Image: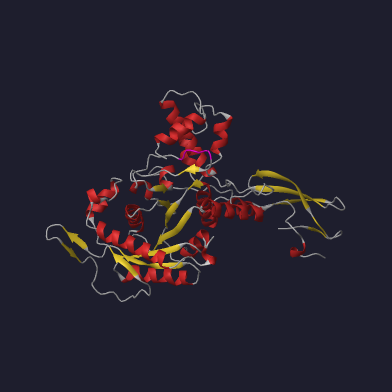
Amino acid sequence: MKFLCVSCDEAMKLIEARPPERGSLTVLYRCPSCAFEFAMLTNPYETQVVASLGVEVGAEPTGTVGASRCPFPGLVRDMGAGGEGSLPWTPEATSRLGNIPEFARPMAKTGIEKFAKERGLAQIDAQVLDQAKDFFGM
Amino acid sequence: MKGYYDIVGDGGSDILEQVQAQQENVVRSLSGVRNLLAIGSGKGGVGKSTLTMQLACALRELGNAVSILDADLNGPSQARLGGLQDRILVPGESGAPVPTTRSGIGVVSMGMLLPEPHAVEFESVTSGSSHTWRATREFTILRELLACMDWGKLDYLLVDLPPGAERIVQYAELLGPRALFVLVTIPSDLARGVVARSYDALRKTTNRTLGYVENMQGYYCPDCERVKPLFPAQTQVKLDLPCLGSVPFDPELAALCDRGGFPSDSTAPVSWQPVRRIAEEVCRRVAERAPAPEERR
């Protein structure tokens, strides 16, 4: 979708995309010529169209790891992923977590922490990830 | 006044660019995969998943590096078939390493991420409307799996497709024109009719269909050591594509599958030799024609 400032015949530029609130996105645009601003307010269906593609309005087009949501939120909640008792992750390990699909991260995080706890480890670092990789035969 | 195509870019939302970047990542991730082989049917319950794992084992025995992507997100089978239900995805230094079976077949399946009996559920900001978004979400997940997994160098990546004759074209589009298809049927007009629809749909794409496999061709009776018919001997629906081979229904194999086992020379059930012949036939047909430039993606 593109927007045109009719008075200036100029393409409007995105200046801010606010996080969804009750399924509605607020995206602000400004005309680079006359500085006229307006906000596009999406309905939940329109928001969902974008979310289903695994993209975010205004995000960098790296496409490295999509933004699709976890398709098993109930199970993740039941397992208490990310809740009390979860282990700290070093920045390097957290960065490596970005190498797996976003939807799979909560389950992977829970599984790796379980693996570490069973071995009496207090935090997740790159070494623990390598141990887990070897243990799980990858 | 300017029109849509007079304006370069989209003003900053970058949605189109993000989708294109996702597609480019899939191409990059699969660059080490020599042959992309989708196993489909259109019909459910004909043994696609079992045959996919058997075929992977046979291709592996023939000296190929093989992995499987279980594209059936809602009824995943490959984790159980490969005895990999307890595996988790562990992030590597680049991408996610593919879990492998004891015989060295890589498997990526939702069954590793989601233990039985949990079902995939898609939350939606629009209450009660997940049916509207589900297909898009599923394909987005598959695209992420294709892009993020570290497939490495493979001779064959087998993609185990879910049922749905009309959806086979969507999978062809997702996998790109170089994906080859094998269709699975059983000797009944009911199944063959659906497979014929799938083939009709595939003919409208640029993807090549290698042929079909007739599964559950008969029942192997261990008492009389003969294959007896399971379905009526005569079928009316003709399939206008090569038959790659037939595989008898094999209770021994079914038991192996439930245990997460897999056929090998040491535990060869009666269906093993037919599957090996099919694997040889697949290799022969794949080698028969080098991919056309438009198939290389």
Residue B133: image quadrant is: bottom right
Specify whether residue B92 is painted magenta: yes
Q: Nearer the viewer, residue B7 or B193?
A: B7
**Is any atom of residue B42 visible in this view?**
no
Q: Residue furthest left?
A: B224
Give percent across and percent down for residue B175.
50, 59
Q: Between residue B153 and residue A60, name the one nearer to us.
A: B153
Residue A133 against residue A67 in the figure, above or below: above
In the picture, measured across the screen, residue B218 lies left or right of residue A37, that is left
Name the chief secondary structure element in magenta.
loop
The percent coordinates of residue B106 (x first, y second) are 40, 47
Q: Position of residue B173 (x, y in %)?
A: 52, 62
Residue shown at 44%/26% (left/top)?
Answer: A117
Quadrant the C terminus of chain B occupies: bottom right
Q: What segment is highlighted magenta in the picture?
A: B89-93
Measuring from the top left, give residue A98's x and y in whole percent. Answer: 56, 39
| Residue B101 seen from this side | yes
In the rendered image, the vertical position of residue B280 relative to residue B113, given as above or below:
below
- Residue A99 vs A2, above or below: the answer is above
Q: How is the image coloured?
A: secondary structure
Q: How many marks?
A: 0
Query: Residue drawn at (33%, 48%), measured in percent from left and top?
Result: B81
Residue at 36% of width from left, 56% of height from top?
B52
Image quadrant in which you'd find residue B10:
bottom right
B160, above or below B202, in the image = above
Decide which of A62, B266 is in the foreground and name it.
B266
Left or right, B121 with reference to B3: left
Q: Is residue B257 left or right of residue B154?
A: left
Is B131 left, or right, of B49 in this rendering? right
**Quadrant where the N terminus of chain B lies?**
bottom right
Q: Nearer the viewer, residue B23 or B278?
A: B278
